[in-house]
Amino acid sequence: MKRMPLRFAVSLRTGFFKTERYALVVLSDALAFVKESGDGGEKEQRALIPYSEIKSVTVCSCHPAEIEVRTFSETYVGTFLEAKEAEAAAAVLRFLLGGRFTAV
């Protein structure tokens, strides 16, 4: 039985004062930020981040809940569109990343 990747809706900061809707996709060996077109067509992948490249992931339970993914070369910052998804994502990321994960 093939496992489907977990997806969490986020608003990812893509520029100064600019955010766009993406899905945070939890894969077996990496995290990905994927933007889906509104018509259900093509998907644009902003980042594919192997777990080995992740320095830390922080989920802040403020309102709205935030996520920060730090790699050795970049930092990705966004907010979860649903509070329940933030809680679920935190549980999964804590399991996968261990000491590299922090919930605030």
Image: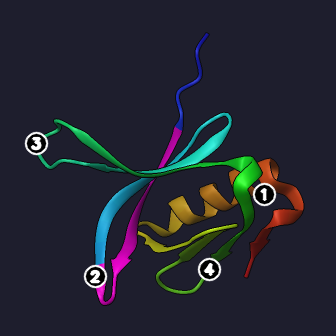
The question of residue 72 being in magenta is answered with no
- Amino acid type indicated by mark 3: Asp
* Residue drawn at (68%, 61%) of the image: 90
- Amino acid type indicated by mark 1: Arg
Identify residue for label 4. Answer: 61
Q: CA distance from mark 4 to mark 2?
A: 22 Å
Q: CA distance from mark 3 to mark 2?
A: 22 Å
The question of residue 11 being in magenta is answered with yes
Q: Position of residue 19 (x, y in %)?
A: 31, 76
Report if the CB atoms under discs 4 and 2 are less than 8 Å apart.
Answer: no
Up-down: is 85 above or below 32?
below
Q: Earlier in the sequence, mark 3 or mark 2?
A: 2
Up-down: is 101 above or below 66?
above
Q: Earlier in the sequence, mark 4 or mark 1?
A: 4
Q: Is residue 34 left or right of residue 99?
A: left
- Amino acid type indicated by mark 4: Ser
Marks 3 and 2: which is nearer the front? 2
Q: Earlier in the sequence, mark 4 or mark 3?
A: 3
Give the number of the disc on residue 94: 1
Callout 1 environment at 10 Å: few (<14), some (14 to 19), or many (20+)?
some
Q: Tell me where residue 86 sits by quadrant.
A: bottom right
Q: Is residue 54 left or right of residue 98?
A: left
Q: CA distance from mark 4 to mark 1?
A: 14 Å
Identify residue for label 3. Answer: 39
- Amino acid type indicated by mark 2: Lys
Task: Find the magenta span and give its range.
Answer: 6-18
* Residue drawn at (61%, 10%) of the image: 1
* Residue drawn at (46%, 74%) of the image: 78
Callout 3 environment at 10 Å: few (<14), some (14 to 19), or many (20+)?
few
Q: Secondary structure at mark 1?
A: helix
